[in-house]
Amino acid sequence: MSTTTAPAPTSALNLSRTTATATRVLRQLRHDPRTIALMILVPCLMLFLLRYVFDGSARTFDNIGASLLGIFPLITMFLVTSIATLRERTSGTLERLLAMPLGKGDLIAGYALAFGGLAIVQSALATGLAVWFLGLDVTGSAWLLLLVALLDALLGTALGLFVSAFAASEFQAVQFMPAVIFPQLLLCGLFTPRSNMHPVLEGISNVLPMSYAVDGMNEVLRHTDMTTTFVRDVLIVAGCAVLVLGLGAVTLRRRTA
Amino acid sequence: MSDSCGHSVKTEARGPDRTAPIAPPRACAAERPGAVRPLTAPLAPRIIQHMMNYSPGPPENPAVRAADLTVTRGPRTVLRGLDFTVPRGQITGLLGPSGCGKSTLMRSIVGTQAKVTGTLEVLGRPAGHPALRTRIGYVTQAPSVYDDLTVRQNLDYFAAILDPGRPHARTRSRGGTPIGAERRQNVEGVLADVDLTSHADALAGNLSGGQRSRVSLAVALLGTPELLVLDEPTVGLDPVLRRDLWNLFHDIAATRGATLLISSHVMDEAERCHRLLLMREGEILADDTPDALRTRTGADTVEAAFLHLVDEAVAAGRTKETAR
């Protein structure tokens, strides 16, 4: 009997604990239908608005619309994750979980899984609406748009998790949105091509992950096939997401002052 | 219904657990820390399983052993070179005014406190050892549960973290019950322990303060831990609930052989502990049984004994200063 009842060891990643965490995060969200509705409907509404703001120039809508399909999931997931993990830190549940045999990887992967799933729903709806109803003219496959959107969502989750370690309150966490996201938004090529910017700004935009998210979207917009640039963009966004998730894991400490 | 201790038994959901004859709390295993008392009645599988896992160890092997334990937080030294032991199978009360370092000491034992120096051994291993994480139940002062989940969803989640089951063993039985069923039984059991079965499907955030702290306690009881570290578990509860919880604590110590370390700043709760650690300003003033404390200080109550010891300490501090 002693062999079967020995406690399961704490490994870096345990599938059951990860899925239990993802299920728990989704269950928490289910008790908050308004948040779900906002997360899913707001991007659609914004695209709809945009379509008629640029009623006269379909070309502009194509450019901005495709970029926004990559930016929305990043911003939403950033906000939701940073607040959710901040709440986890301040409510004491994080301390309790880390005193239990939960791996840090389980927690992070659980969050990424839950919010990633939600991001798929959000991106699928937004992409579907843009391509089929708002006449977004995509040369490439809509599936590739969805792939980039999903990676963006993961990047948002990773950034949110990371900055929540530096926020002591919800007020601060929300302020990290303009601090972390807005500069990327300005420099990512949404408003003007990055090559038209001041060289210094262009240099900065080259090291910001959102630039590659937007580039990837534009590649799909213009090319039928997966270009090497697209593959590079996707790999950079995915790599950044993994890197920041790793940094996020470092900020989860079992022992705190 | 009441058991032989005179504990009121809140529910019969886990009837067999409670039918074993139980010695009065004061006497349980007090002389032989960690020893398992002879039991005549058949035991529930849960208890048998627990006893088989439970390694009492020699009497000189306490649940917690600290030597020169020091903790700093920023510029402040919160715990100053503590030396003490917490015997197994008993309830040890950790008492002292708020801000004296009780919570820091508890966090050190659980392994969540940073900057701990000196020796701190918990259940035979250094505090914070990964192998201890399933063996210790910990309740923080503020209830740490998810307000946007129901009571049962909270417990389900923490139970899954404690015992995720093993791949390939999912459908196999363990002691006759599949793992999922065993986890469910565990959840129902702790719900009954804290008397929240009727609120199982309510959102934790909608419960009263006392109910939420009992959800937090229920989480700590999951998985039948060998050491329970409870930071002010009865604060803000009404007298009836407090009595019920203390009966539960004694029940856990007596029938499961678990060690409980319970902090409180309410001195009348001290009388219910087997042993007491009295703290003040990061130091331990006394480490004794309530009776011995009263006898030593010639006081009628533990509160009076504590005040006496504080006055002594203050006086001693003053003489030291004037001598300088």
Image (tube, coloured by chain):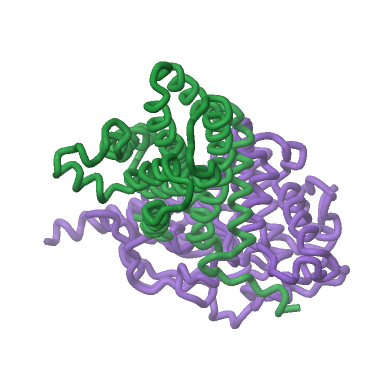
Chain colours: A green, B purple
Front residue of A250 and A202: A202
Answer yes or no: is residue B190 visible: yes
Above or below for A17 versus A86: below
Q: As drawn, is B148 to the left or to the right of B266?
A: right
Residue at figure coordinates x 63%, y 68% from the top left: B89
Quadrant housing residue A61 = top left
Residue at figure coordinates x 51%, y 62% from the top left: A103
Residue reaching furthest left? Answer: B324
Q: Residue B44, how many percent across, how many down?
A: 83, 65
Residue reaching furthest bottom? Answer: B58
Total marks in image: 0
Answer yes or no: is residue B144 visible: no
Above or below for B90 versus A196: below
Front residue of B41 and A238: A238
Q: Residue A94, how many percent across, how many down?
A: 48, 51
Above or below for B227 versus B55: above
Q: Residue A85, how many percent across, how many down?
A: 46, 45
Front residue of B242 and B164: B164
Front residue of A221 and A202: A221
Q: Quadrant of the C terminus of chain A?
A: bottom left
Above or below for A61 versus B123: above
Residue at figure coordinates x 36%, y 52% from the top left: B310
Q: As drawn, is B212 to the left or to the right of A184?
A: right
Q: Quadrant of the N terminus of chain A?
A: bottom right
Q: Residue A251, how many percent across, how many down?
A: 37, 55
Residue at figure coordinates x 35%, y 61% from the top left: B114
